[in-house]
Image (cartoon, grey):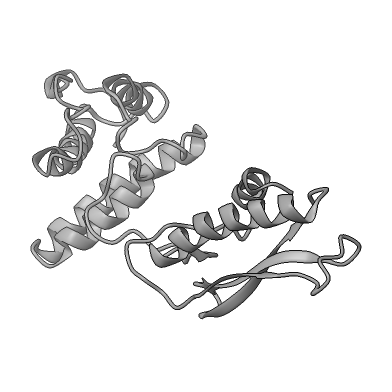
Amino acid sequence: MTAKQAQQQLIQDKSKLIPMSETYPYKLCRLSKPKDNSLEKPWYVEFYVWDATKQKLHRKRYVLSDDTAKAREIEAAKLIKQTNQQLIAGAVINPVQKKQIGPIQPETPLLEAIAFFLKYIKGSKKPRTYETYKSDLQKLTDYLTTTNQTNLTLGTFTFNHAQAYIDYLIIDQQLKNLRINNLKATNSAFFGFYQKRKTINENPFKGIDNLDVQASKHKS
């Protein structure tokens, strides 16, 4: 195996070396070979790398299989140089995936963004106001579930989605216009919250006109 092939294999390996911003324990590479340089016996480069999941050093070996002893020594030297650079730079295997902490992102599932918003406002709103927000946003959650749109993210919910939701409230739910206007206001406040935080560029409910309350003939 050449140094290039070994590196390619390393990239494909489930336990590949992952560069990190910190340094971790390691043991540099060494070439292990028979004293008589026999090609019938194993030649390999051995080193120890930090397993971030198990929190301990893990031994790895790259077997060399070139046709001559000289070729194996040359390829081993290249491989040792490349791998040692990675180890010194802080490479690990099986890095621990950190949970997202901090602001919601456009890629965050919409349902997660709703949950975060409700937690955020709970301490600053009166109990009755908070329950109204919670109930109104649950209405949107139920709609997304019913229409198989729970895969939408905060950033992919557009004006067209908002308009389709209002149409659903009018046609399918047959709610009173006042109730629909209130639901729209809550949803606009929700998306406006993330717009002010510059998480999203536009509020999808902005531009949707309120319904005429006097003309309402729907159920409550």
Q: Position of residue 166 (x, y in %)?
A: 30, 25
Q: Residue furthest bottom?
A: 56
Is 18 rendered above or below residue 31? above
Q: Is residue 204 left or right of residue 27?
A: left
Residue drawn at the location 38% of the way across and 25% of the way down: 168
**In the rendered image, which quarter is residue 217 located in?**
top left
Q: Is residue 123 left or right of residue 78?
A: left
Residue 13 in sight in this render? no
Q: Position of residue 162 (x, y in %)?
A: 29, 26
Residue drawn at the location 19% of the way across and 43% of the way down: 190
Q: Position of residue 66 (x, y in %)?
A: 79, 49
Residue drawn at the location 20% of the way across and 35% of the way down: 200
Quadrant of image for the C terminus: top left
Residue 207 in sight in this render? yes
Q: Residue furthest right?
A: 40
Q: Position of residue 52 (x, y in %)?
A: 49, 72
**In the rendered image, which quarter is residue 197 located in?**
top left
Is 137 rendered above or below residue 181? below
Residue drawn at the location 38% of the way across and 62% of the way down: 89
Q: Nearer the viewer, residue 28 or 10?
A: 28
Q: In this figure, what is the number of numbered marks?
A: 0
Q: Nearer the viewer, residue 144 or 65?
A: 65
Is 132 rendered above or below residue 32? above
